[in-house]
Image (cartoon, rainbow, N blue to C red):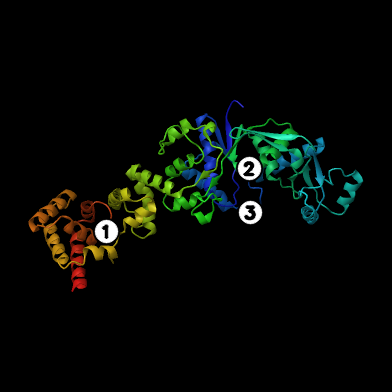
Amino acid sequence: MNSIRVRFAPSPTGSLHIGGARTALFNWLFARRNEGRFILRIDDTDLERSTEKSYHEILDALRWLGLEWDEGPYLQSQRLERYRRAALELLNSGRAYLCYCTPEELAARRKAAQASGRAPMYDRRCRYLTPEERSRLEDEGRQPAIRLAIPDSGTTVVRDLIRGEVSFENSTIDDFIIMKSNGIPTYNFATVIDDYDMQITHVIRAEEHLSNTPKQILVFEALGYELPYFAHVPMILAPDRSKLSKRHGATSVEEYRDAGYLPEAIINYLALLGWSPEGEEEILPLEKIISSFSLEKVSKNAAIYDIKKLTWMNGHYLRETDLDRITEMAIPFLQKKGFIAEPLAPESYAYVRRVVGVVRDRVKTLEEIADAASYFFQEITSYEEKGINKYFTRPDVADLLERCRERLAEVEEFSAQNTEAAYRALSEELGVPTGQLFHPTRLAVSGRTMGPGLFDILEILGKERVLERLKKAANYVRKITG
């Protein structure tokens, strides 16, 4: 127990859920904070639902988040013989027994128990079979499962590092199956063998697993294994305090990645779901999160998932992260919309970088960068309706746009500084407020009423495109104003 060893053990039956990512993160942080080891184990004994696709999606999501593991991934499906040996050990010691009951018989008994108001627990009829009775059942061709023999009385106490002591009456715990009749171990059995073999010191997992813990403790004790420490982190609930699901929006790491969220924003946000560091600061660099993390500061109460807060946090990281990195991450989103070639030519990178640099301050995701940047890559085919009504309906606008075009045509070095100086001089000469020139020009060159600084836009678009768009807009205004 001197060296900290923790594990994350997802089932490859779907993408990495945001709740699973939070569990992985807490384990990873605990390991890094304590100079321990973070082990990745894949619980793939559900042969019908486990898929190779999900397996790779989970690994890719963890890598994308930066949660690199120190050992693994270990696959339970490759350890079946080890589970069978452990089950045989329990059979030989009398701590487990063969159960020949068929699924149909078990279902009928559960139904009868519920009808009579009793708990639908296994009635233990195979626990005390005589050798003759077992022989007869085997002659019928029945393939037995293996059940753990739970003590008839007493309590099993979970000493949880977050919740304190939680007691479970043994009389309420079923003689649960540890090995199915097909030779596949159940979750509560395989996880104990794995945790023991992999020398896991701390089992940090979601609160929903708390009810499994007394069963696992009983397996540990039956095998004579030393218990690890347990810590059950709070559930993540939707804003309406219901279970987080698809109806609340994206729920998998993959979906957030594809929507243009940054891994550091997700890590920062997930760390604060159920864990409270000192102080009021919410934007925390990873190094600070690692150095501050402790299970003592993890709450017992459910954490409420707030997509608006995550999105706000993502916007912060978009603005503050190195521009070249954001550009590299934005390129696939621009390519997806057909704005730039795939692969991007080296000479085009500088232009894309400039575009990303000016639009990222007003957006919150990489996907929004692509939406906000469209007029830098495509010709304008329409203007925002609210902009038309506000800036294109005055009869003098077409003439003002023409005057702007003429003045810009005289600018030799087409920089933001020079174009702004030209506009301010023109405003003074014409005796009109700068807004009467700025707003129609913005709409003319971008098709929008909001965006980056106008003169940054002009500089990036370049003189030729700006003059062409001003001419096109002036003609459009004359057409709609008669």
The image position of residue 104, as x and y in percent, is 79, 57
62 shown above or below 296: below
**From this viewpoint, is residue 342 visible?**
no
Residue assigned mark 1: 449
Q: Which residue is depicted at the point 14% across and 54% down?
A: 423
Image check: 316 left or right of 247?
Answer: left
* Amino acid identity at mark 3: Arg
Image check: 444 left or right of 12?
Answer: left
12 shown above or below 205: below
Instruction: State which mark lies toward you, 3 or 1.
Output: 1
* Amino acid identity at mark 2: His
Residue assigned mark 2: 209
**Disc sitting over residue 49 in the figure:** 3
N-terminal label among 2 and 1: 2
Tag 1 secondary structure? loop
Tell me the quarter of the image containing the N terminus. top right
